[in-house]
Image (cartoon, rainbow, N blue to C red):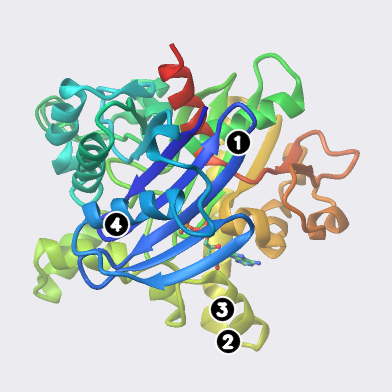
Amino acid sequence: MLVFILNAGSSSLKYQLMNPETTEVLASGLCERIGIDGRLVHEANETKTKKDLDMPTHKEAIEIVLDVLTQGENKVINSIEDIDSIGHRVVHGGEYFSTSVLIDEDVVSKLKELIPLAPLHNPAHIIGIEICKELMPTKPNVAVFDTAFHQTMPASSFMYAVPYEDYKEHKVRKYGFHGTSHFYVSDQAKQMLNKEDSKVIVCHLGNGSSICAVRDGKSIDTSMGLTPLEGLMMGTRSGDLDPAVISYLMERKDMSANEMTNYLNKKSGLLGVSGISSDLREIIEAAANGDERANTTIDMKCNRIKKYICSYAGMLEGVDAICFTAGIGENADLIRQRVCSGLEFMGVEIDNEKNQVRNDQNREINKETSKTKIFVIPTNEELVIAKDTYNLTKA
Ligand code: ADP
């Protein structure tokens, strides 16, 4: 059984070919600069190749990927007939989808309807789905949604305190994102805890960052909202702020709605405050060299994570495990240490030596005496996509 996993973005396309039964990854890679010029980074048979190739649209990109999988010295299959099914990562499933689904005409029309909620992502996913249907017409396609895991949130978590009609008419509510990662990591934590009715907080800290409160395997609240802009301070996204800042700055700086959206999504966060980079490693380095603004940026990042952890511990009425995942969560021991220090009052005791160990395994980094476990769990969204695709198509 082989699943072709596709994550189509507006000018990029990530892919993997995985056997969901053995979890073996046969090949993985990325097409970048689609519609501009085109670059392929492909990894298979322990060999990484980079090539500049013409990719005017997503169609040529997918054709190129299918070619490198089936031809040349690093081919991993003989023909596309060896692919059994295709799993698509889809950012926004709105209120329609609370689980992964087999894609049919009705699913595609719902994805189209949801474009206003994810104007950059859903159109690219639809293109990816349509091209796969054209190039591999006999293969089933499955959609796996970033929002689906959070559909268990109660109304008290997902409603915004704005007039109710705007929820009904315009679907203004919190949806949450990174659901596949929050599901995977909380599920791993549940197994590591081996406890009924577990209370877990997952901190997915990458360029995009979000936190999720998970009770007995179900998301009960999460920090991202209608879009992935709400919540934590991120690489270039502001996260939470007083909504009045928006109209205030639009008036003072004569900004349009589009300019403001760009300002909050692309120019804010770590980049905006530090003035250095959206990459936390560069900010940590600058802080170590005495840059005050870099220091403040790191303090802000950590304080905000801490605030969410404490508020979710309150909502969960306790916490069995705090989990760190994604680029920052898995690698930045400094951030984990700063976030956890001071939380001893709620039974969180980090072990500084264990925290500094680096590997790609699930690991526990709390002291023996800590009432709350602290886990580092490398996320694996592709595995969830492959397994869901396999389960929905094996019949
Ligand atoms: P994306 O959301 O793009 O998938 P990732 O999960 O790959 O992001 O995370 C990228 C972030 O992880 C970057 O901000 C990068 O600086 C950070 N990061 C990776 N390794 C380290 C490290 N050793 N120390 C601090 N930050 C790190």
Please report the residue visible at 48 percent of the width from the left and 18 percent of the height from the top. 391
SS class, disc 4: helix
SS class, disc 1: helix
Question: From the viewer's perspective, is 315 left or right of 245?
Answer: right
- The tag earlier along the polypeptide, 1 or 3, is 1
Residue in front for this viewpoint, 180 or 165: 180
- The tag earlier along the polypeptide, 4 or 3, is 4
Count of numbered labels shown in the rendering: 4
Q: CA distance from mark 4 to mark 3?
A: 32 Å
SS class, disc 3: helix
Q: Quadrant of ligand 1?
A: bottom right
Where, by quadrant of the figure, is residue 108 drawn? top left
The picture places residue 196, in percent across and down from the top left corner, at: 69, 14
Please report the residue visible at 41 percent of the width from the left and 71 percent of the height from the top. 51
Check the image and report above or below for 276 versus 345: below
Q: Determine which residue is flagged by label 2.
A: 291
Res. 282 mark:
3
Q: Determine which residue is flagged by label 1.
A: 185
Mark 2 vs mark 4: in front: 4
- The tag earlier along the polypeptide, 2 or 4, is 4
The picture places residue 4, in percent across and down from the top left corner, at: 43, 38
Q: CA distance from mark 2 to mark 4?
A: 43 Å
Q: Determine which residue is flagged by label 4.
A: 61
Badge 4 amino acid = Ala
Disc 1: CA contacts within 10 A as few (<14), some (14-19) or many (>=20): many
Indicate if the residue with disc 3 has its beta carbon within 8 Å of ligand 1: yes
Badge 3 amino acid = Glu
The picture places residue 366, in percent across and down from the top left corner, at: 82, 44
Question: From the viewer's perspective, is 62 left or right of 318?
Answer: left
Res. 239 mark:
none
Mark 4 vs mark 3: in front: 4
- The tag earlier along the polypeptide, 1 or 4, is 4
